[in-house]
Image (cartoon, rainbow, N blue to C red):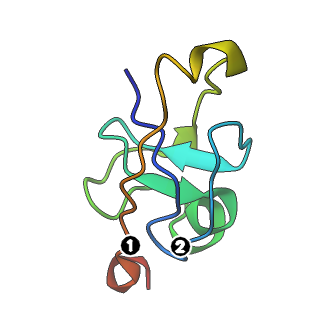
Amino acid sequence: MLALRPGCECCNADLPPDSMLARICSFECTFCQHCADDKLKGICPNCGGELLRRPIRPAGRLAKYPPSTERVFKPQGCL
């Protein structure tokens, strides 16, 4: 089950569970589209993996499978 983390690790922008702008790697490191594309060039700074659009969890499933509230913010890795 994807964690659906609530924010970008680079700029701390909010990324709600229905955001089309969220990008993740296979380890679920989470970034906004701007940081993923412009700063990171599609490569996760933590693991070197590819950053892809995070899937949207259907709204009807969010109550049973809520998104994570854990916010990871590591701007030093996004320079």
- Quarter of the figure with residue 55: top right
- Nearer-the-camera pick, 57 or 35: 57
How many numbered dots are placed on residues in this image? 2
Q: Position of residue 2 (x, y in %)?
A: 41, 28
- Quarter of the figure with residue 14: bottom right
Q: Which quadrant does the N terminus fall into?
A: top left
Measure the alpha-carbon separation of dots 1 and 2: 6 Å
Mark 2 closeness class: few <14, some 14–19, many ≥20 residues within 10 Å: some
Can the viewer see residue 54 in this picture? yes
Q: Is 18 situated left or right of 15 in this image?
A: right
Query: At numbered mark 1, what does the secondary structure look like: helix, strand or loop?
Result: loop
Q: Residue furthest front?
A: 63
- Quarter of the figure with residue 37: bottom right
Q: Earlier in the sequence, mark 1 or mark 2?
A: 2
**Residue 60, numbered circle:** none
Give the residue pinned by disc 1: 73
- Nearer-the-camera pick, 62 or 52: 62
Q: Position of residue 8 (x, y in %)?
A: 52, 63
Q: Position of residue 79 (x, y in %)?
A: 44, 85
Q: Are marks 1 and 2 in contact (CB under 8 Å)?
A: yes
Amino acid on which the number 2 mark rests in the picture: Asn
Mark 1 closeness class: few <14, some 14–19, many ≥20 residues within 10 Å: some
Q: Is residue 79 above or below residue 23?
A: below
**Residue 12, numbered circle:** 2
Q: Position of residue 56 (x, y in %)?
A: 65, 27
Amino acid on which the number 1 mark rests in the picture: Phe
Q: Is 71 situated left or right of 4 in this image?
A: left
